[in-house]
Image (cartoon, rainbow, N blue to C red):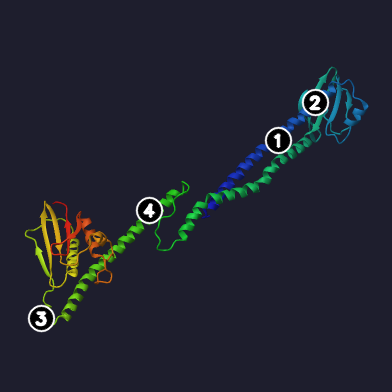
Amino acid sequence: MNSIRARVLALLLAMLAFAAGVMGAVTYHNVLAETEALFDYQLRQMALSLRDQGEIAPDQAGALADRELDFVIQIWSADGQTIYASRPHDELPARAQLGFADVSAGKQTWRTFTALRGQRVIQVAQPRQIRQRLAAGAALRSVAPLVGIAPLIALLTWAAATRVLRPLRQVARSVRAREPHSLAPLPATGLPEELSPLVQALNGLLAQLAQAMDTQRAFVADAAHELRSPLQALKLQIRLLERAGDETARASGTELDLQAPAPVPLQGDAASLAVLVRNLVDNAVRHSPPGTRVAVSAALEDGAPQLVVDDAGPGIPVADRERVFDRFYRRDPGAGDGSGLGLAIVRTIATRHGAAVTLGDSPLGGLRATVRFPPV
């Protein structure tokens, strides 16, 4: 049984059956006891009513002799002589014991009550079998409503179990209705306390998967960019060579000026720092007009390593200088072969090394990119 609802329902029904059985048994025995006490009360009242009478009138004697009456009345004198018997019987109790007693006579047992009045002994008796049959019938009638209502209680229990587990089914439907690529969190409001930790754990897992997929996409995009940049540079050079009419026109189109008067100490990942420098220089060269200069300088400024790349290109307006760091953002999508990842990669690598990247106006007339690392 793998269904939670079936397990809960089976457990509730088992508890219900157990409780109904205990209640039925207790009710049955209580009604038996109360019925027995009522029958004893009737015996006693009948005997005491005869004790207070002088004689039994003929019409009363005829009523007491009715065979439909379950009670048998006997009266003895003080010396044991039978004075009166309500009706003849083959197996009447032949002895008297004051108060209540169970007397065996023949093949049956009688429940008797005997009272003493002057010189007379009055006994009222009733067969035990009749008393037990009447008591059992009354007890069964008291238990019958419980048996009749049991199916209704079972139905209500099933409905309650279904209602209680409704939030779990709603979460399952929400998961099944999702698109395969959807990693949005599941609704976590209004959930029972027992279900909320599960949904929170699922949302945490979805968030981790989304972060992992974003990281994977960024890695693939960065790798594609790094693979494409050398190819694009080579294609550009080939185009320039094809358009050049002579050897003079084929010479270097952009001058690269490196200013590093002294070694600059810096701790970090050499491969990723090389990618950072290459992307900045590649952007500067790509946007610089032919015959201009790109200046690259590396030095310590107030004890902090600093890399500055200047170009003579069109530059970037102040309003767009923050947006160009967004992945795949290009100010002019139709111009050039860039993918909009170069500066995004630069900022990612700089952030990883605790550095800050800023863009400004270059003395060469274009853009100045400055990368300032933490002091060494």
The residue indicated by pointer 2 is 45
Whether tag 2 and tag 4 are in contact, CB under 8 A, the answer is: no
Query: Label 4's element?
Result: helix
**Residue placed under numbered mark 4 in the picture:** 204
Residue 236 placement: quadrant:
bottom left
Q: Which mark is first along the chain, 4 or 1?
A: 1
Q: Amino acid at mark 4?
A: Gly
| Alpha-carbon span between mark 2 and mark 4 | 80 Å
Mark pair 2, 3: CA separation = 142 Å
- If you read the primary sequence from the N terminus, does the residue marked by circle 1 or circle 3 appear first? 1
Disc marking residue 343: none
Badge nearest the viewer, 4 or 3: 3
Q: Are marks 4 and 3 in contact (CB under 8 Å)?
A: no
Q: Which residue is mark 3?
A: 247
Q: Residue furthest top?
A: 118
Q: Please state if 316 lies on the left or on the right of 249 as rendered.
A: right
Q: Three-letter amino acid code at disc 1?
A: Val
Residue 278 location (% of width, % of height) = 17, 65
Q: Residues within 10 Å of mark 4 (few under 14, many from 20)?
A: some
Q: Amino acid at mark 3?
A: Glu
- Give the residue type at disc 2: Gln
Image position, residue 219 (x, y; %): 28, 63
Among numbered discs 2 and 3, the one appearing first in the sequence: 2
Looking at the rendered structure, which numbered label has been put on residue 31?
A: 1
157, 260: nearer the viewer: 260
User: Of marks 2 and 4, which one's residue comes earlier in the chain?
Assistant: 2
